Image (cartoon, rainbow, N blue to C red):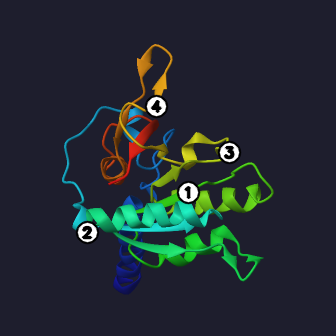
């Protein structure tokens, strides 16, 4: 009977320990954008030296190279996954699954067409990231996902702080490094903003 009690205790403890893992997906907010729905709580942040960004290609090789070069210039480690292999289109979701085996702190996708011919695959991939509690950052998206809970930020690359404006006021602008830092550390930030590259 004592052994049975220990077994039940062990199962209960395993369940309790697993609870925080299930809580890494915020309710009614994107991963990395939860401050949009709650007050900011001071916390230890992840330094850029500890970041590993998973850059997943949406097919725009030139934009991918720009983003990878920007991370290199500011000292942020990045790994790259192409969704094209000798003309064959690979499934974006598989790239996300593969990268989740590494300690990636965020996914960055340049030029995603989330409503195009591969919309189902991109939706699966973005959900894979959300379920893993990893923020997704979109750069120069062609078409945005309909579900805003699937990405933390939508960034538009500009050449200078003054080159992008919205009617009546200046659009929020920061460096790519600052924008990524905000999403990775779940700090307050606009959902959509312009970014400059180093």
Tag 1 near tag 4, CB within 8 Å: no
The residue under the point 43% across, 33% down is: 163
Measuring from the top left, give residue 57's x and y in whole percent. 59, 66
The mark found on residue 143 in the picture is 3
The mark found on residue 110 in the picture is 1
Q: Is residue 149 positioned above or below 164 on the image?
A: below
Reading the chain from its start, which is encountered first: label 1 or label 3?
Answer: 1
Give the total number of marks visible in the rendering.
Answer: 4
Reading the chain from its start, which is encountered first: label 3 or label 2?
Answer: 2
Label 3 packing within 10 angstroms: few (<14), some (14-19), many (20+): few
Q: SS of the residue at dot 2?
A: helix
Along the viewing direction, whichever of 109 and 37 lies nearer the viewer: 109
Closer to the eye: label 4 or 2: 4
- Tell me if 193 is positioned left or right of 123 in this view: left
Distance from the alpha carbon under mark 4 to that under mark 3 = 19 Å
The mark found on residue 50 in the picture is 2
Residue 136 seen by the camera: yes
What residue is shown with label 4?
164
Distance from the alpha carbon under mark 4 to that under mark 2 = 31 Å
The residue most toward the top is 168
Q: SS of the residue at dot 4?
A: loop
Along the viewing direction, whichever of 123 and 90 lies nearer the viewer: 90
Measuring from the top left, give residue 193's x and y in whole percent. 44, 37
């Amino acid at each position: 009977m004592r052994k049975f009690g220990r077994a039940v205790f062990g199962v209960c403890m395993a369940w309790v320990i697993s609870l925080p893992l299930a809580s890494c997906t915020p309710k009614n907010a994107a991963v990395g954008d939860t401050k949009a729905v709650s007050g900011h709580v001071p916390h230890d942040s992840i330094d850029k030296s500890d970041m590993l960004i998973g850059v997943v290609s949406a097919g725009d090789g030139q934009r991918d190279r720009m983003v990878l070069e920007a991370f290199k210039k500011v000292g942020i480690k990045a790994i790259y996954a192409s969704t094209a292999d000798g003309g064959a289109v690979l499934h974006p979701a598989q790239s996300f699954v593969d990268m989740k085996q590494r300690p990636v702190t965020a996914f960055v996708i340049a030029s995603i067409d989330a409503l195009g011919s591969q919309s189902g695959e991109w939706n699966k991939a973005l959900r894979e990231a959300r379920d893993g509690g990893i923020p997704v950052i979109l750069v120069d998206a062609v078409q945005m996902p309909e579900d805003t809970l699937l990405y933390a930020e939508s960034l538009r690359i500009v050449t200078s702080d003054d080159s992008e404006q919205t009617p009546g006021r200046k659009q929020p602008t920061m460096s790519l490094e600052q924008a990524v830092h905000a999403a990775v550390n779940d700090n307050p930030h606009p959902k959509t903003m312009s970014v400059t590259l180093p």
